[in-house]
Structures are given as structure tokens and as C-alpha cells.
């Protein structure tokens, strides 16, 4: 399995609050995660680092992967809240968090916020997670269209985050085959690059390092306001 990650600070913000993790284990399992910290000057990157560090404690020899991921997510939520209690200057910080354990032909994932997990097989891109956001709720209700969602003024508002005191993660399992590609991204990427272009770039006859660079550069060219992070695993 080939893995690669790339993150870039956008043109507007002075610092990058995105964090990512690629953890390779002795049994050839791989854990991938991405977090997009929020809070601006309130230190969203601190929340993202805490969340990534906690989820990175995952073990591939666990009996119940889903249970382990949920427990670590709960602990990450508590750890961030405890950090705020110790330092009130950090009040308001939180983070998205999306992670997937690739183990023995399966991917076990957990998700909070609007970072995303994609599963690419051939020319088909499957969006595994669902944004926990106001805009997604409006889409589900039929109040707005997909085109309206892209330019909605509240498109960056999420319903839940890790460390905000209301963390209800979603989880799932996917089957993976040789040749599949797994991608995690923060909204700086998938809000700027449409799915057809993502599929086009990931289908390039090139190493995943080049694919990641092309994705990030396309996001910078299209918008570039937000920080951009992509994590890839080629099976």
C-alpha cells in the first residue's frame, strides 16, 4: 500500500489549522486521519493536534474496531474540553475529525464535522461520510439545491465538532480491493474542487504524490482561501 499526505496554508489565513496522520502498523494495517481545527486565534490547531494524537492511539489488534474508534473519539472530545478548562484563552476551539483504519480488506471509519472520506474504484468516486453541517441539513430538507450549497454563505458552519461539547460521530465500514484508492480531505480541497475533477486527477497514470500535488494545486487555483489537506492511500 502506498500512502501520501499533503497540506498547504491558504492565501487568507496566516496559519494552517489542518492536521493529518498516517500510521502504519506491524500487521500491514494503516490508519489515516485528517482534522480541520476551528477557532482561529483561539487555537484551532491545538484542538486538531489533540484529536489526531488521541485517535492515533488506535490498535489494529483490537477485537472491536468500531468500538475502539468511538472510545478514542469520545476521549478526544473530553481531552479538548479539559484543555479549555485549564486555559480559558482556548475557549471556543474545536475540530473536525475523520479517520479510517484499513485492515484486511476492510476500512473502518469514524467521522465528525465536514472533512470527508472518499473511496475511489476505477472511475467511480464514493463519498463515504456525510457533512455534519447546516448546508447539508438544508440539502437533506430540499430547501436548497446542490448549486446553491456551493455558494451558500453558511457553507462553513458545522453542526458538530470534537471538543465543542456535542460530539455525535458517524461510523461505517467499507470493503476495499487491490487497486482502490482512499482519500481523506478537509473542506479547503473538496469545497474548491468538484467531484468530476477529483476523479479525473486521481485517475492520472501517476504516483500518488503527483496526484496529491495536482489536487492541492487545483484547489489553490480555484479558490485557495482555506487551508487544504489531502491524505491518500493506494491499495
Image (cartoon, grey):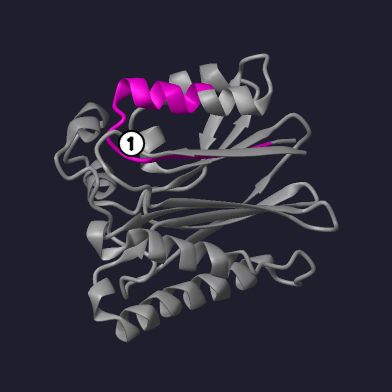
| Residue neighbourhood size for the residue with mark 1, other residues' Cα within 10 Å, grouped as few (<14), some (14–19), many (≥20) | some
Q: What residue is drawn where x is 50% and y is 54%? A: 98
* Mark 1 lies on residue: 10
Q: Is residue 157 above or below residue 122?
A: below
Image quadrant in which the C terminus is located: top right
Q: How many labels sit on residues?
A: 1
222 in the magenta segment: yes
Q: Is residue 170 left or right of residue 179?
A: left
Vertical arrangement, residue 163 with respect to residue 200, above or below: below
Quadrant in the picture for residue 93: bottom left
In the rendered image, residue 165, in percent from the top left (x then y), is placed at: 32, 75
What x and y, as percent, mark residue 9?
A: 38, 39
Provide the secondary structure element on which disc 1 rests.
loop
Residue 188 is inside the magenta segment: no
What are the residue bounds of the magenta stretch? 214-233
Residue occupying image coordinates x 54% and y 19%: 201
Please indicate, yes or no, whether residue 29 appears anywhere in the rendered image. yes
Task: Determine whether, in the image, residue 30 is placed left or right of residue 18.
Answer: right
Q: Is residue 198 above or below residue 105?
A: above
Amino acid at each position: 500500500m502506498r500512502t501520501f499526505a499533503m497540506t498547504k496554508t491558504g492565501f487568507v489565513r496566516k496559519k494552517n489549522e489542518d492536521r493529518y496522520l498516517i500510521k502504519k502498523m506491524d500487521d500491514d494495517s494503516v490508519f489515516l486521519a485528517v482534522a480541520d481545527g476551528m477557532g482561529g486565534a483561539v487555537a484551532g490547531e491545538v484542538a486538531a493536534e489533540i484529536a489526531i494524537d488521541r485517535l492515533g492511539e488506535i490498535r489494529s489488534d483490537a477485537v472491536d474496531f468500531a468500538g475502539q474508534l468511538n472510545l478514542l473519539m469520545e476521549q478526544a472530545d473530553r481531552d479538548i474540553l479539559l484543555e479549555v478548562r485549564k486555559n480559558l484563552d482556548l475557549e471556543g476551539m474545536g475540530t473536525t475529525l475523520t479517520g479510517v483504519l484499513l485492515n484486511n480488506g476492510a476500512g473502518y471509519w469514524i467521522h465528525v464535522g465536514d472533512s470527508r472520506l472518499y473511496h475511489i474504484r476505477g472511475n467511480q468516486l464514493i463519498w463515504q461520510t456525510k457533512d455534519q453541517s447546516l448546508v447539508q441539513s438544508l440539502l437533506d430538507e430540499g430547501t436548497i439545491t446542490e448549486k446553491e450549497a456551493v455558494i451558500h454563505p453558511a457553507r462553513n458552519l458545522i453542526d458538530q465538532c470534537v471538543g465543542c461539547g456535542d460530539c455525535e460521530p458517524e461510523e461505517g465500514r467499507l470493503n476495499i480491493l487491490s487497486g482502490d484508492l482512499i482519500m481523506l480531505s478537509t473542506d479547503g480541497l473538496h469545497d474548491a474542487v468538484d467531484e468530476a475533477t477529483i476523479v479525473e486527477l486521481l485517475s492520472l497514470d501517476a504516483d500518488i504524490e503527483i496526484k496529491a500535488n495536482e489536487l492541492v494545486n487545483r484547489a489553490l487555483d480555484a479558490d485557495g482561501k482555506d487551508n487544504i489537506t489531502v491524505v491518500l492511500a493506494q491499495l
